[in-house]
Image (spheres, rainbow, N blue to C red):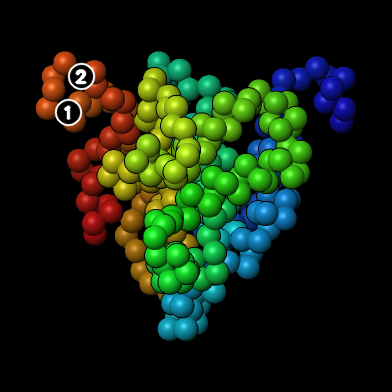
Amino acid sequence: IDFKILNLTPQLISIMKATTFNDPIHGHIDLSPLCVKIIDTAQFQRLRDISQLASTYYVFPGGSGNRFEHSLGVAYLAKRFVKRIRKSQPDLGITNEDILCVEIAGLCHDLGHGPFSHLFDGRVLPMINKSRHFEHEHASVGILQLLIEENNLMPIFKEFNLSEADVHFIQELILGDKCEAPPGFEWIGRKEKSFLYDIVANKRNGIDVDKFDYFARDCHALGLTKSFDAKRLMKFARVFPINRSLDDEKPPVLEICYHIKEAWIGID
């Protein structure tokens, strides 16, 4: 099919050309064509060789998963979560571009992991450079920029109405909060869509789709039982204006909130 002749919008093309992956945790998942372009780069493919559970594999023989499959799962959950919020609260003004930004952030959030994942961050890097604080998200932001430049993906981003400002927004979504930004990174923020920062890397309370995926994926790999139900948690989530400041004159901030009855899902 020649989509240009049909004069379809990038959003409709995205739906019609979405690629389906058979994931052992979430079943058949659809990712956008732009995500597939990112997946097909050398920078992303390296995640196939980055262990998800690092040295845990030496204790649990099933813990042989990698960051590649986890990243696909997070991208899927991120898109599903934000689309669910848009459906339940259309007044929030969530756009197709917002959904795509969140999906890409979920896909690329672990680009910066090194060998043995967190073991590399916590043990190896401090031995190499004790004077510099490093988080893998810092590298994820840099590698995403490198990935776009070296593979000339910016024209494709623009085909889906994503600008350089949106790429910067995706990098912010990966970091989660201004205080997590690496030196020299300019935090711009989107106050009217502040709740979107809670989806991939929630620095307010830690409840995000990154954990939703690895709770299910790691338990499946290690043969452990779980009672956590991410789908139910996302179904009953809502966005509310919250004022955490002692100063009543400060405007409230939009946050993703969860029903109190569902809070015990993550504890049990």
Camera-side residue of 94 and 183: 183
Q: Position of residue 229 (x, y in %)?
A: 36, 52
Element at label 1: loop
Point 53% across, 52% down: residue: 139
Q: Residue at x 29, y 41 (%)?
A: 204
Q: Earlier in the sequence, mark 1 or mark 2?
A: 1
Splitting the image into 4 quarters, where does residue 200 fall? top left
* Residue highlighted by disc 1: 245
Q: How many marks?
A: 2
Q: From what the image shows, is residue 231 above or below residue 127? A: above
Q: Looking at the image, can residue 21 be seen?
A: yes
Is there any visible trace of residue 11 in the rendered image? no
Image coordinates for residue 175, horizontal then vertical, percent: 44, 43
Q: Is residue 251 left or right of residue 197?
A: left
Q: Which quadrant of the figure has residue 115?
A: bottom right
On the image, numbered disc 2 is attached to which residue?
250
Q: Residue at x 43, y 24 (%)?
A: 190
